Image (spheres, helix red, strand yellow):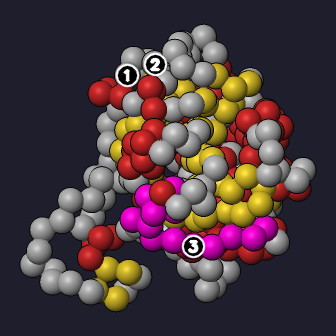
Amino acid sequence: MEAVKFKDDKIILIDQTKLPLKEEYIVTDDYERIATAIERLEVRGAPAIGVTAAYALALSVKNKNVDVEEEFNKAYERLKATRPTAVNLFFGLDAIKSEFEKHKNDSQLYSKLIDAARKIHQDDIEMCEKIALNGLSIFDRKMRVLTHCNTGALATGGSGTALNVIRHAHFNGFVEYIHVDETRPLLQGSRLTAWELDKLGIPFSINTDSTAAVLMKEKKVDLIITGADRIAVNGDTANKIGTYNLAVLARHHNIPFYIAAPTSTIDRHCRNGNEIKIELRSKDELVKIGECRFTSDAYDAYCPAFDVTPAELITGIITEKGVFRNPYSLENV
């Protein structure tokens, strides 16, 4: 189960907009097509976006019949504009840009950039496993876990963040059951997380986002784990819209609320959540499911892709370097 592959000088992406009903793949070496895939959420999840963007930028110098530096800079700006909130995008792009500046006159430029992208990919694979192992420390008994959006293999270059913690905990006997928020408006929970859990053979059920409060009230949730798209150095965290709701509910019901993410998701230039730019998406994502429109196109709609959870509502942040707890000071992590 891989969201991103690189083979025969082409990137291979599973089209996540088609899941779980169809498993179709995008195979391309065109950075413009990859940028479109990121915008359309055909590939999504902060770490997967970072890995994908790194490969895309490296591919921009593959064609020797163009002005390489001009094309590279054009590709950098195009890819940078795809998703403004996920910090891993900029981490991946800037790492490739740094390599480009060092080797732009080298005859082996393309292979060096691809090697750099492969390293970013491999690092993400290793970080995913370390996150999962560190996450085992938050379990002290068999627990019922609630999660939001998709944070598994589909969201990363490896085996996932929050969902990978849950996966490892399950196979170590610490997870009894998973409650999967559907995650409106694009249903990443009911489409993607459910698809992954089904393939892994882990027991789960889908619930509407608004059912989470009832599950907590009925004491059917012992622990909540979600991912992150950007973490400020004070611990404020941007994640898929609906995460803040969960954190508030968790505090009211005295349920531990954890974030799982690689340290590449920490924005060391961002002091707090007020500085995180929140992406606004097309209202079509809210008034349609797939191609089916279920309300009037004349109605206005507010459709932020993310919300920000204040650090004081987060029990701990699980990373490949350990589990950090409030008060957070993540500048040098």
Whether residue 132 is visible to the viewer of this picture, yes or no, is: no
Callouts 2 and 1 close, C-beta under 8 Å: yes
Q: Could you say whether the residue bearing mark 3 is in a helix, strand or loop? A: strand
Query: Is 37 situated left or right of 112 in this image?
Result: left
Residue extending farthest to the front is 218
Please name which of the two marks, 2 or 3, marks the residue nearer to the observer.
3
User: Pointer 3: residues within 10 angstroms few (<14), some, or many (20+)?
Assistant: some
Query: Is 235 situated left or right of 177 in this image?
Result: left
What numbered label is drawn on residue 272? Answer: 1
Q: Residue at x 67, y 62 (%)?
A: 178
| Residue 119 quadrant | top right
Q: Amino acid at mark 3?
A: Ile
Q: Amino acid at mark 1?
A: Asn
Q: Which residues are magenta?
A: 202-216
User: Pointer 2: residues within 10 angstroms few (<14), some, or many (20+)?
Assistant: many
Whether residue 321 is visible to the viewer of this picture, yes or no, is: yes
Magenta run includes residue 204: yes
Q: Position of residue 237 (x, y in %)?
A: 46, 34
Callouts 3 and 1 close, C-beta under 8 Å: no
For the residue pair 31 and 325, the one nearer the viewer reads as 325
What numbered label is drawn on residue 206? Answer: 3
Distance between mark 2 and mark 3 Cα atoms: 33 Å
For the residue pair 26 and 311, the one nearer the viewer reads as 311
Q: Residue at x 32, y 48 (%)?
A: 279
Magenta run includes residue 45: no
Per the image, the residue denoted by label 2 is: 234
Query: Is 23 situated left or right of 45 in this image?
Result: right
The quadrant the C terminus occupies is top right
